[in-house]
Each structure stands twice: as structure tokens, then as C-alpha cells.
Amino acid sequence: MDWRSADCALTGHHALEMEKSDWTDGHLPPGSEVEWSDVQPYVRYVPRDVVLELAVRLSHWVPGNIMEFGVWRGTSTRILRRTLSRCRLAEFGGPPKKIYACDSFEGLPEKYEKVEVGSFALAAPPRIRGVRIVKGYFQDSLTPKLAAEVKQVALASLDADLYSSTACALKWLTPLLGTGSLLLFDEFLGENAAEKRAFDDWSRESGIRTVRVASFAREPAGRGRVLEERALFQVVGTERINPIPAFWNWVMKVKRQLGVGFAP
């Protein structure tokens, strides 16, 4: 499924000086050598909070918990918690969910693009009510004991930046994923494409099938300069995805007609 960006209006002396080879069928793909500063005045990308909200809503009826890999100050964690709470109030029903937020809080163990080792370190993890903070480098904290506690994962939000960290998280997630489980990558494509490389290698090694259900252009991460991309994948398992119970499906249809509640 190809990524498509918003069309850019190119007029007069404001026309972007872009090489024709950077465009595919009239569209600018993520990772292009065209600099973000040249494109930014002409596009409006989907904010991160909207992407996170969409992922939580899609995972609402999928059995399992929500995992976050890469927390830092907890901004995205709070968005996940807020949206989950709204889903519970607006939709009723649905499998119960907890949020697990995983991070070393010691900073990057390796350099990421132009971001140095130790960046994003905190003196102490954020305190977020209703969220289980899992502190430690992934190779130490993602244990069989934690997997036994989590049991199933409905949504994994991966913002680990590094190939090694993303690969470690994906390997640990493998037995916890099932039909409908969602994988959201915060920096899927860009200058480094570490998360994409880790995902591609994991897909080949695990044999797990996924479908890309959404892609979103984003500003550069890692203090880079090129257009990047967030990507949302859904696992295609051996069983069909659990249908929404008929009663709750009817309730949601009525609420949508009244203009309240979330769409499943």
C-alpha cells in the first residue's frame, strides 16, 4: 500500500525547488532527499495525538492490553490513557485493557541520527495514574514474567527510535499478538528508517502477517531534515477478527446517528 502525501500548491517564486526524481507519480515519498523545511509551508500533517487516538479507538474491541515502548516524559502515554478512558465511557463494553509504558529513562544507549547517546534521560519516571511503568532497558525489562502478566496485546505503540530497541520489543511481543493486534510505529520512515528495518526483519523471521491500515506524514525526528512517516499495521492471524457483539454494535450505530461516541 503506497503512501500518498497532500498535494502541494507550487506557484510563482514560492515554487519548491525539488528534483523531479524525488516525486513518484506526482507524490513525494517519505525519506526523500527533499528537505522538510521546503515542504512544511505547503502541507498540514496529522498531529501525533490524533494518530494515537485513532490507534486506541481501533484497538478498543481487540482483546489485550496496550503497550508503549519509548515513554520519555509521558506525553503520549497520557494521550493513550485519556483516549482509552473516553472509549470506555462512550462505547461501553469491549475487552478490559491496561496500559504498560516501557522505557529505561536512562536516555538513548546509542546515537540516533543527530541525537547523541544519553538524550531523553530523566531523573525519575513520570507518575501517571492508571499506567504500569516498566523501567529498564528492553533487553532487561521485557521478561517472560512481564509477558505472563500482559498475556495479550491489542495495541503496541513503538517509539523506541533505535533498530536494536525496536527489534527487541517486536521479538518480545511476538507470542502476545493475535488477530487484530495493532502496531503503531512513530518513526517508520525517515533518514535512518531504523524502525522499518527492524519491522521488515521481524516480519521475515516471525512469519507474522500484517496489513498496513494507515500511514501519516510527519515532521523529522532525530533532528533530521527529511519528510518522515508514522505507520499503523494490523496483524492478520489464523482466526477471524472478533466481531463487535450485536447489541453494542447497535448501540454505537444509534450514538453515531445522534452525533455522540466513537466509531469502532
Image: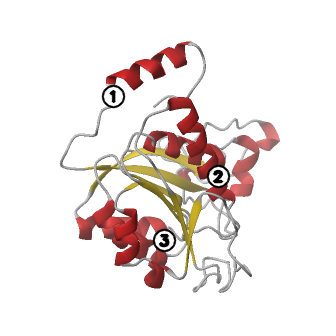
Residue hosting label 3? 194
- Residue matched to label 2: 18
Q: Residue at x 32, y 62 (%)?
A: 176
| Label 3 vs 1, first from the N-terminus | 3
Specify the amino acid type for callout 3.
Ala
Point out the tag, 1 or 2, that comes first from the N-terminus: 2
Mark nearer the viewer, 3 or 1: 1
Q: Label 2's element?
A: loop
162 and 15: which is toward the camera: 162
Give the camera-side residue of 220 and 226.
220
Q: Quadrant of the C terminus?
A: top left
Q: What percent of the width, then of the height, locates residue 2? A: 42, 45
| Left or right relative to 21: residue 14 | right
Residue at x 28%, y 38% (from the top left corner):
242
Three-letter residue code for mark 2: Met
Give the foreground label among 1 and 2. Answer: 1
- Please name which of the two marks, 3 or 2, marks the residue nearer to the observer: 3
Q: Is residue 170 left or right of residue 241?
A: right
Secondary structure category for the residue under label 3: helix
